[in-house]
Amino acid sequence: MDHKDRQARIILWENNAKFIQVAYVQEDGQEVIGRYERWGWVQPPSEVVDDVLNTLRKGPRRVVGRQK
């Protein structure tokens, strides 16, 4: 049996693809189901990148003593 004959299929799609479940059948007939959670970006939105870069440009801040 070729892997092309055993195409994986999405069996659950939740929360705008934040969670998906994928199933496929192995050569010995066992069905495998995996649950995946999307938790990060491949390419973050430009406004997020700009915000992070602006924060990093400001550098560290050190405060010593009592605050007024």
Image (cartoon, rainbow, N blue to C red):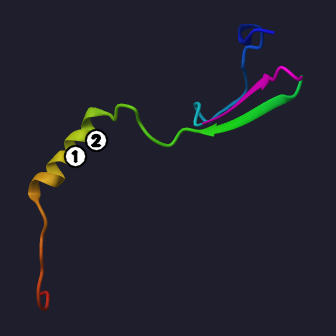
Residue at 82% over, 22% down:
25
Q: Is residue 51 left or right of residue 21?
A: left
Query: In this rendering, is residue 35 above or below 5?
Result: below
Quarter of the picture containing the C terminus is bottom left
Please tell me which residue lies in front, 17 or 27.
27
Q: Is residue 32 left or right of residue 64?
A: right
Query: Disc 1 marks which amino acid?
Result: Asp
**For the residue carrying disc 2, how many other residues have a C-alpha within 10 Å: few (<14), some (14-19), or many (20+)?**
few
Query: In this rendering, is residue 23 above or below 54?
Result: above
Query: In this rendering, is residue 58 above or below 19?
Result: below
- Where residue 11 appears, as percent x and y from the top left, is 76, 26
What residue does disc 2 label?
48
Q: Is residue 31 left or right of residue 38?
A: right
What residue does disc 1 label?
51
Q: Which element is circle 1 on?
A: helix
53 part of magenta stretch? no
- Where residue 15 appears, as percent x and y from the top left, is 61, 36
Determine contact: label 2, label 1, CB under 8 Å. yes
Q: How many marks?
A: 2
The residue range painted magenta reads 19-28
23 part of magenta stretch? yes
Q: Main secondary structure of the magenta part?
A: strand
**For the residue carrying disc 1, how many other residues have a C-alpha within 10 Å: few (<14), some (14-19), or many (20+)?**
few
